Amino acid sequence: MKLSIIVPVYNMAADGKLEYCLDSLVNQTVEDYEIIAVDDCSADGSPDILRAYESRFPDRFRGIYSQVNRHQGGARNAGIRAAKGDWIGFIDSDDWIAPDMYERLIRKAEETGADLVGCDYCLTEEHSMQAGQVVPNNKRSQTGVLDDDKRRSLILDGGSLVVKIFRRSMILERELWFPENIFYEDNALGNSYLILAEHFEYIQEPLYYYYQHSASTVHTISPGRCEDRMTAGRLMLEEARRHGYYEKYLPELEYSFTLLFYINTLFTYMAGVKGARYGFVRRLGQEMKAAFPHFQSNPYYGERTHEEEKRLIRMQQRSTLFFMLYYRLLWAWRKWRKAHG
C-alpha cells in the first residue's frame, strides 16, 4: 500500500467539522491508500460518524476505537501501529486538505528520491476550499539532501508535521512514538521526524486548510496545558540525546527549548490564565536557568526574540515577584488604553 492517512478524533461531531475533514480524505486522488481514524474515547457522536464512513468506504476507511483517552499522541501511535502504507500522513480532524494534496506530495517524493515532503497551509474560519491567509511552512533553502546547515534550519523553522508525509520505515526503525497523555506532542517529536530524514522536498503551495475556531488547542490556555508544553520541551531534549544529535545542534536546540518551554509558556500563562500563580512562574524561570544558564546569550535568542520580551525575561530572571507585578500593571494599562482609544 502506498499511503496511510492517520486522523486522531476527539469530540469533533458538532457543526459538521469531522465530516468535512473526512470528505476531503475519502476523495483524495492518490491511488492505493487507507484512512485510519482513531477515536480517542470521544463522548459525543464522533464514533458513530466514523462507523458510517467505514460502512460507506470499506475499501479505504478504518476506524479504531480507544476505550481510554490518551490524547493526540496516543491516537497517532495507534494509527502508526495499524498502518500498512509506505508513507504516513497526519491530519487533525478539524482540518481538511486539497483533493490532490497527497498525490502531489508522493509524486514529488518519487520524482526526487525524497523521504520527507511538505507543503504550505492556509488559515480559514469557514468550511470551504477557498484559500485563506497563506502560511509558508518551509523554505526552499531547506530542500534537497540534508546536510548540517539544512538540519539546523529545520530545527529552527521546521513547520508543522500535518502538512508533510514521512516514510513509515523511518518512523518504525527510529521508534518515533509520540508522547501520550499530553498536548503539544508534535513539539516533542518534531525535530526527530524532520532531521532524521535524508532528503526533504517542498511544494510551495497551500494544500492544507487549518481551521480556526475557539476549541482548537492553540486557542485554549490553562495551567495544565502550560505544564504539557514544558513537558514537551523536556522530551524534545531527551529525543535529541536519544538519537545522538544533541551536541551537534546544541545552539539550535537551546533556542528551540527556550522558545517552547520558557518564552511561549511564560507569556501565554501570564496572558491567558486567570489568577496566575507566583510559584509556577518562579519554578518555570528556575528550571529554564538550570537547563541553560546562558540562554540569553544564544545568538538565535538575540536575533529572534522581541526586545520587549527580552526586557521582561531579564526582569523575571532577576525577580519573579517584580515581574508579575509589573506585567499586571502593564496589561491593565494596555486594556485601559485600548478601551479609551
Image (cartoon, rainbow, N blue to C red):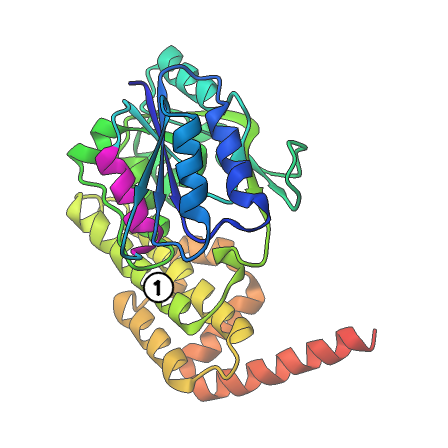
Name the spot of residue 78 as percent of width and height, x first. 26, 42
- How many marks on residues? 1
Kindly identify the residue that appears in the image at 29 percent across and 59 percent down. 181
Question: Vertical placement of 278 versus 184: above or below?
Answer: below
Per the image, the residue denoted by label 1 is 228
Disc 1 element: helix
Question: Vertical placement of 284 versus 178: above or below?
Answer: below
Name the spot of residue 149 as percent of width and height, x first. 35, 35
Q: Report whether residue 189 is seen.
A: no
* Apparent side of residue 238 relative to residue 100 in the rendered image (left or right): left
Name the spot of residue 28 as percent of width and height, x first. 48, 22
Q: Nearer the viewer, residue 93 or 177?
A: 93
Q: Is residue 76 magenta?
A: yes
Q: Residue furthest right?
A: 341
Q: Quadrant of residue 103?
A: top left
Q: Report whether residue 82 is seen.
A: yes
Q: Nearer the viewer, residue 282 or 21?
A: 21
Number of other residues with Cα within 10 Å of mark 1, as a class: few under 14, some 14 to 19, many 20 or more: some
* Apparent side of residue 250 relative to residue 25 in the rendered image (left or right): left
Q: Is residue 284 magenta?
A: no
Kindly identify the residue that appears in the image at 36 percent across and 75 percent down. 285
Q: Please name the amino acid that badge 1 sits on.
A: Asp
Predominant secondary structure, magenta span: helix
Q: Residue furthest top?
A: 111
Q: Quadrant of the C terminus?
A: bottom right
Kindly identify the residue that appears in the image at 50 percent across and 49 percent down. 13
Q: Quadrant of residue 331?
A: bottom right
Name the spot of residue 77 as percent of width and height, x first. 26, 43
* Apparent side of residue 205 relative to residue 25 in the rendered image (left or right): right
* Apparent side of residue 52 relative to residue 41 in the rendered image (left or right): right
Give the residues drawn in magenta, as a range: 70-82
Q: Quadrant of the N terminus?
A: top left
